[in-house]
Each structure stands twice: as C-alpha cells, then as structure tokens.
Image: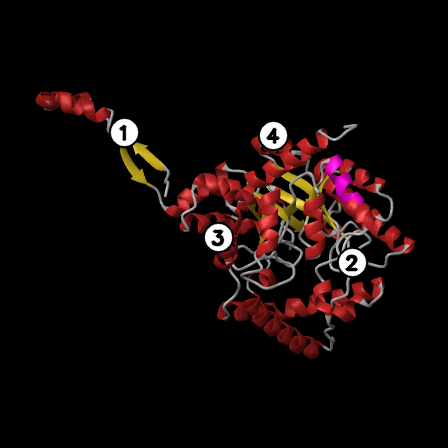
Amino acid sequence: MKKYKLLLMIVLTSVTACKQPEKKMESTALLDTPIEIPISLEEHAKRLHDSIITIDTHNDIDVKNFTIDHNYTQNLDTQVNLPKMEKGGLDVSWMIVYTGQGELTPTGYQAAYANAMAKFTVIHKLCEEYAPERIELALSSKDVRRIVSNGKKVAMIGVENAYPIGTDLKNIEKFYKLGARYMSLAHNGHSQFSDSNTGELDGIWLHNGLSEMGKKAVAEMNRLGIMIDISHPSKEAIKQMIALSKAPVIASHSSARALCNHSRNLDDELLELVKQNGGVVQTVAFGAYVNEAKNDKFVKARQALYWKVGDSLGITILTRDSIQKLDDDTRKAYFAKFETVQKAAEPILNKLKSEMDLVNVSDFVDHIDYLINKLGVGHVGISSDFDGGGGVLGWNNASESLNVTLELLKRGYSDKEIAWLWGENLLRVMDEVQEVSRAQPGN
C-alpha cells in the first residue's frame, strides 16, 4: 500500500564537521540521504481525502431548510449542510429535486411540477443569494474542478422521478436549463414514463418497461446531456434504457443485489449491462439496501420504542401507508407531533444503537468490493441518500465522510483508485454524456 512519507534531512553543522574532519566525506553524503518517517494510516487517509474530489451523488432536500434565516450555511439538524460538508471534506453534494409519485392526471402533473420548481428555486437561492462565497452550482466536470480549486463547495442537481415533466417533453429542457444533470424516469410507483422497481411487490406493471413517451425521454436526455439514472425503475425498464441510450447511464444510489436482495439494488445481469454501457454504479449507504437483516432488526426495535413513547405522550404512531393517505395539513400536524416523540425517545434510542449490531461503513464497503469485482474499479462510485433515509454507522452525515476513505485504504485500495471511486468515475461519465449531446444533430 502506497504511503505518504515525511522527509527529514539531517543537517550537520560546521562545528560537528570541524570536530570530525576525517568523516567529512561521509557526512556530506548523508546530506543527500533523506530519512523517511512513515505516517499513520489515519493521517494518510486525511491527506488523501483532502487532495481528491469527493462527490456524493444523492442528497435529498426539504425546502423548509432553504429560507433566508434557516438554511445550509448553518449546522442544521440535517445530514448534509455546509458546516458538515466542510468538516467532513465532502466537496460535491448532488441536491435532489425529488417528487413522490402521484396520479397520472393533469392535476397530478401540475402539483408535481410546482413541487419540482420549488426545489430548483431554493437550490439556486443557496448558491446565488445565501452563500455564493461558500458554494456554487456546477453544470459540468470543468465547473466542478474550477469551483473546488477555488476552495468552495459544489452543488449539483439531480431529478428523482420524471413525474413533474408531465406529458410535455419540452419540460426536460427546462429542467436542464435550471441545472439538472441527471434524472430518473420513475420512483416508488409507475410514472407516465417508466415502470418502477416497486412492481416486483405486487407483479403489476403499467408499461412492461418504458412507455413510448419514456423511450422519447431517453433520446431527449441524450440530446441535452442529462445522465439517465437507473436507480428506481424496474429491471425491464432499465434494460430498455441501456439498450436505447447512446450515452453511459448511472445508478445514482444503488448497491449490489447479490449481497442484499432488495428490488432497489442491481443484480448481476444489470451490472454486466452497465459495464458494457460504460456507466457507473454509485454504491449507496442506505441501511436497507446494504444489510437488510441488520437494518430490519434495528427498525423494528426503533418502531417499538416510538410506539411506547408515543403512547406515554398520548400520541398515536401511524404506519407509512396511513401517513400517505393524510391530506397535506393533517400530515404536517402529524409530523409536528411525531417530532415530539422522536425528541423524547432520543436518549433511549442512542442507548439502543450502542447495544445493537448496526449496518456500518464496513458493510457498505463490502458492496463497493463486490461491485468492483463485477464491474471494474472504473465503474463504481459513492453515494449516501442522506436526508432521504440513508446513512450507516460511521458515515451517518457528511461530516463523517473521511471514514469511507479510511475504510477503503484499510482494504488496500490505492490512492488513484480511491480518487476514481470518490468522484473521477462519475465525472468521466458526465463528460461522455455531454460529448454524446454535442454530437447530436442540431446541437
């Protein structure tokens, strides 16, 4: 394993030389012979981490955290914000314009579009009004390198679920002009463009892959230079996207299905297709997609705790399905009460965490190992899904990002390989996608 070396030159004073004239020739030779003092693995990790571009390709946002007096310039109770990025040496945060899947109706599309536009707006406000001296929006790999070299953090924009596009493909270009540089065609639920991985649960499919409009969306994303994100669509939809795309694809936040059998992960057949396509899989540190058994055990224990604390406070804890059926005002009121339960349960929950075998950084890097074995080190990257359910013990917010680098070093990865994993592979795909765009007729 390559290590940094501190070089200590032995300088002999003229006094010493006078006392030992017969050793003068030998002493002069020592001046050109450095003594190498090896540094610790931890210090190696820190120096390496600080010298490379570190990119996390999936961080969810909430517009309530982007107001003039409550935003990412402060160390909010979020997994990602500027103080945490600065502390953890995380250079690039892909901030996500996420929209949950709703009804495929004009009313549904209108509401989804408004939601997406609100998120685009607040990301621009952070970069252009609240903290332009600390963070800047990047639209290309050149932007990323320039901004990082200037000592600032980088925001990039990914669209999770093309549902807000509605039925007007011109909206894809609108989103591109607002900064979107990757987009998934579905999320949890079938969209107008693509089936979702969630169809595995009930065996019900809407398009048997991509709709005709979804196929046109792939061509339009190629034309514009938007990376196609395969993390949430169904397996058949992914296969069709890869077959149709003229450019490499990405999985912005997915792991290996062979290690954790979840429909959000990619099986070996899909991994081989990504490899042939030249794309990249951004391994995700989401407990349920890394080690389902460990994660389920903890989630059940936490839920039992919330029920117990909620009961003591006279607050009924609802299931996710029940929450989704609430209207907006009722849902907001419920979450306000639930926050009270969370705060009351926090001391007990922390004790519970210390006693349980939680999904951790080592489990996460197991997936990186597996993906590299299948794809090669040039096709694997890193993501967290922070503020969207992601985070594992040891990398539970952006301030702990160094721990991933340290774990990779412990496993024998070279400095160059770690640089590829943390960002260079993703930037390479961005460049190739934009090259395909420039080659399109009319561009």
Q: Residues within 10 Å of mark 2 (few under 14, many from 20)?
A: many
Q: Position of residue 321 (x, y in %)?
A: 76, 69
The residue under the point 64% across, 46% down is: 250
How far apart, in angstroms, are the residues tagged by discs 3 and 2? Answer: 32 Å
How far apart, in angstroms, are the residues tagged by discs 1 and 4? Answer: 36 Å
Hey, which residue is sitting farthest left in the picture?
22
Which label sits on residue 369?
3
Q: Residues within 10 Å of mark 4 (few under 14, many from 20)?
A: some
In this rendering, would 288 be left or right of 211?
left
Sequence-wise first label, 1 or 3: 1
Q: Position of residue 278 (x, y in %)?
A: 60, 41
Q: Which residue is mark 1?
A: 9
The magenta region covers 216-223
Say what amino acid the circle numbered 3 marks.
Asp
Above or below 190: residue 113: above
Above or below 71: residue 392: below
Q: Which residue is mark 2?
A: 190
Say what amino acid the circle numbered 2 marks.
His
Sequence-wise first label, 1 or 4: 1
Say what amino acid the circle numbered 4 marks.
Arg
Q: Which residue is mark 4?
A: 146
Quadrant location of residue 121?
Answer: top right
Mark 3, secondary structure of its residue: helix
Mark 1, secondary structure of its residue: loop
How far apart, in angstroms, are the residues tagged by discs 1 and 3? Answer: 40 Å
Question: Which quadrant: the C terminus?
Answer: top right
Which numbered disc, 1 or 2, marks the residue closer to the eye? 2
Q: Position of residue 279 (x, y in %)?
A: 61, 43
Report the predominant secondary structure element of the magenta stretch. helix
Membership of 222 in magenta stretch: yes
